[in-house]
Amino acid sequence: MGSPQKSLLPRQVTWIPKSFVRISILILILFFIYQRIVPLSLISDGTDSSKRLLPQKAKSPPPDDPRYQDPLEYGPSYIPPVDASKVNKALVIGRTRYENVSWVDELGPDWTPYIYTVTTSTPLNSLTVPANVGREAMPYLTFILTHYPNLPKYTFFMHAPATQWHNDEIQPGDTSTLSLLRAFPARNLGKRPYMNLHCPHDPGCTEGVYPFSYNEDSFIQREGRVVWPKDYARLFNVPISQVPQWLAGPCCAQFVVTREAILKRPRAFYAGMREWLTEKGRVEPELNTGWVAEMLWHIMFGEEAHSCPREDVCWCEVHGRCEKEQKEGE
């Protein structure tokens, strides 16, 4: 018998290129990650995306959503309005993913919260920032840039924790943020364009910052004041000769400011500061960039380089604890 004839038809290809398999696996992984970060309900519910930016009651997260099993991973229950010009009192907060800010819901309807999550994976309905640098300065500046010039009448810039040492004790042992905000006398809103919510002079006012006073240890420890004159000159667009010799103000980057005070500087100023913050944040310790910004807020909003109100005056204006009024009432 002769050998069987070979088929003239082309052999069918049954193998799959390795590159195709790798790409398919990568697509599946990316889809899984995206689904974890952005629930499908947010992109496939048929809602016009522009309408989601209007004031509305936020959707409750699905009870089986694993992101919400941890009670600390809290998403705000309210989507704030994009046009903030009609807002009377806004509350701007920067938080990490697991910082519990549920206390905000207890403030009442006269407050409008804008809660920014600085970490990459954000809870439902949370606002975001372009980069997680500069501590609270990044969400503060992002809020201003997003809403400029349609800003609230008054904006309180605060940290996320429900209690913290940055808060003054409204009552003995009470350092809750709720107590601090509720104690602020409504009659004093706008009394001064910028009001720091921390009254004690220590820390902040007792020493302050001497931009031109540093030594070899300052360089070794990469202290922010080493580059302070150059950074200040860049941010405020002034020559080095106009950099203050001494800056001081109460700590701790928690304050209320009027719309007019923010608008006294052009939007480009705040954009330039956020750009500086992003650049420096990639190479400088987080403490440095946030600390530099903390020592500049009062100057940005019209105060002198050295701005340390008397503690008793601050307690009266900010917390409603006025010694004179108390004595008259006795």
Image (cartoon, rainbow, N blue to C red):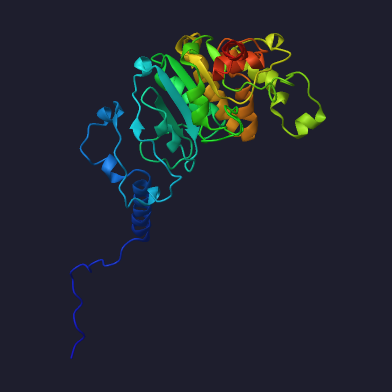
Where, by quadrant of the figure, is residue 28 drawn? Answer: bottom left
Query: In the picture shown, does residue 220 fall above or below 229?
Result: below
Name the residue at the bottom extreme: 1
Q: Nearer the viewer, residue 274 or 310?
A: 310
Observer able to see residue 128: no
Across and down, in percent, residue 271 comes to 49, 20
Image x and y of residue 324, in percent: 61, 11
Question: Image point 63% across, 21% down: which residue?
Answer: 199
The answer to which image quadrant residue 287 occupies is top right
Is residue 195 depicted above or below 287 in this figure?
above
Q: How many marks?
A: 0
Would you say 149 lies left or right of 161 here?
left
Residue 203 quadrant:
top right
- Identified at 76% across, 30% down, the residue is 219
Foreground: 226 or 86? Answer: 86
Q: Position of residue 257 (x, y in %)?
A: 50, 15
Which quarter of the image is occupied by the N terminus?
bottom left
In the rendered view of the protein, which quadrant contains the C terminus? top right
- Position of residue 7 measured from the top left corner of the image (x, y, whole percent): 18, 74
**Left or right: where does residue 80 sit relative to residue 119?**
left
